[in-house]
Image: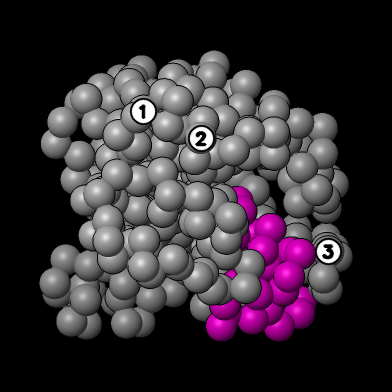
């Protein structure tokens, strides 16, 4: 079968490896249908690492996918051969202290698709996964929508962590890439309408407006703090940082009202942020970190199936597997109005 691997910084190649033939009693073979290009994939592509997770080449990348069940182990009951499934890329052990505490996303023994030293990525014709990672959606959505569920779960979880109780809450989002837009989708689905999106790329601001953002700020042409004050004299209740940029964190602290919440979901390239602790302390701001998602797949699927979220609105590009290097190049360089690129097999 075909498998796409990273071979160096901003270098990729197509390889041929044997098809998987056997599965364990609780495993399935999945024929991949659609794979999304994620921001974390781009970190591995462009920088060769995310924090302490360092790529050893060649490295099979990719973790957002949907596919068809090709073969199922004897003990598999939740899916059957022929099902279109959403795939959770995270494989938890089920018996460590984190799993037993209801936190499989911080499992001590977690293995993740396309993560160095853990599991090979899904940019391939077939993958083998435990059946508990699969959610059947046959007849409910198409393969592209199914592959977009994983990033949407991060938006769903991010908003859940913010614990917004009032629909009149004022919210801000830094970054209108796939994760920022997923946060926007979830806020709107929850009835939060007063949302400001801060993004330097005009085409992404336009997309945020199309989806339903109330206010738009380009930090390259406007002073973010002044622009927010013009619309919200008392500043914002909650800000979601989905860009991974230091400037965004700095501005987020400025535009939050006292008692506000800063939710960090973006990944900074150098794995560090600095904070104005004097301002944070005086405002008594709460900082919330987001680690992927936790028990949000069912909700994300329902939000799309019900029509509350039109997840395909974020998709800008489609490529065949053979053109994966072009897809990564376009996404990494923000070329051609790229927001979300999908690889279709």
- Which residue in the protein does label 1 denote? 232
Q: Locate residue 73: give its quadrant.
A: bottom left
**Quadrant location of the C terminus in the rendered image:** top right
* 40 in magenta: yes
Q: Locate residue 89: give its quadrant.
A: bottom left
**Which segment is the magenta one?**
38-62
Q: Nearer the viewer, residue 222 or 240?
A: 222
Q: Residue at x 34, y 37 (%)?
A: 235
Expressed as whole percent of the image width and height from the top left, the position of residue 174 reads 51, 43
* 75 in magenta: no
How would you rate the neighbour count of disc 2 (Cα within 10 Å): few for under 14, some for 14-19, many for 20 or more? few
Q: Residue at x 42, y 32 (%)?
A: 229
Q: Residue at x 21, y 76 (%)?
A: 98
Q: Nearer the viewer, residue 216 or 297?
A: 216
Q: Between disc 3 and disc 2, whose residue precedes?
A: 3
Q: CA distance from mark 2 to mark 1?
A: 10 Å
Element marked by disc 1:
loop
Does residue 317 appear in the picture of this structure? no
- Which residue in the protein does label 2 denote? 226
Q: CA distance from mark 3 to mark 2?
A: 38 Å
How would you rate the neighbour count of disc 3 (Cα within 10 Å): few for under 14, some for 14-19, many for 20 or more? some
- Which residue in the protein does label 3 denote? 10
Left or right of residue 57: residue 125? left
């Amino acid at each position: 079968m075909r498998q796409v691997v990273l071979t160096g910084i901003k270098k990729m190649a197509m390889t041929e490896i044997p098809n998987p033939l056997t599965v364990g009693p609780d495993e399935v073979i999945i024929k991949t249908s659609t794979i999304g290009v994620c921001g974390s994939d781009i970190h591995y592509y462009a920088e060769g690492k995310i924090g302490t997770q360092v790529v050893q080449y060649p490295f099979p990348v990719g973790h957002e996918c949907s596919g068809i069940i090709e073969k199922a182990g004897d003990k598999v009951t939740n899916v059957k051969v022929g099902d279109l499934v959403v795939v959770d890329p995270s494989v938890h052990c089920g018996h460590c202290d984190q799993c037993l505490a209801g936190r499989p996303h911080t499992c001590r023994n977690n293995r993740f698709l396309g993560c160095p030293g853990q599991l090979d990525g899904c940019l391939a014709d077939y993958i083998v996964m435990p059946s508990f990672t699969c959610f059947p959606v046959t007849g409910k959505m198409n393969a592209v929508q199914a592959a977009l569920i994983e990033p949407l779960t991060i938006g769903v979880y991010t908003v859940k962590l913010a614990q917004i109780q009032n629909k009149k809450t004022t919210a801000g989002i830094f970054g209108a890439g796939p994760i920022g837009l997923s946060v926007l989708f979830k806020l709107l689905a929850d009835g939060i309408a007063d949302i400001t999106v801060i993004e330097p790329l005009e085409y992404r601001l336009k997309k945020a407006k199309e989806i339903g953002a109330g206010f738009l700020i380009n930090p390259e042409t406007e002073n973010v703090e002044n622009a927010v004050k013009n619309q919200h004299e008392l500043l914002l209740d909650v800000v979601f940082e989905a860009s991974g940029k230091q400037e965004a964190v700095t501005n987020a602290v400025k535009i939050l009202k006292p008692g506000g919440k800063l939710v960090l979901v973006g990944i900074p390239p150098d794995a560090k942020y600095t904070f104005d602790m004097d301002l944070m302390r005086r405002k008594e701001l709460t900082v919330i970190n987001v680690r992927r998602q936790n028990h949000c797949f069912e909700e994300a699927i329902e939000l799309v199936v019900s029509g509350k979220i039109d997840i395909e609105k974020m998709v800008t590009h489609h490529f065949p597997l053979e053109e994966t290097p072009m897809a990564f190049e376009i996404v990494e360089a923000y070329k051609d109005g790229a927001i979300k690129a999908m690889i279709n097999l």
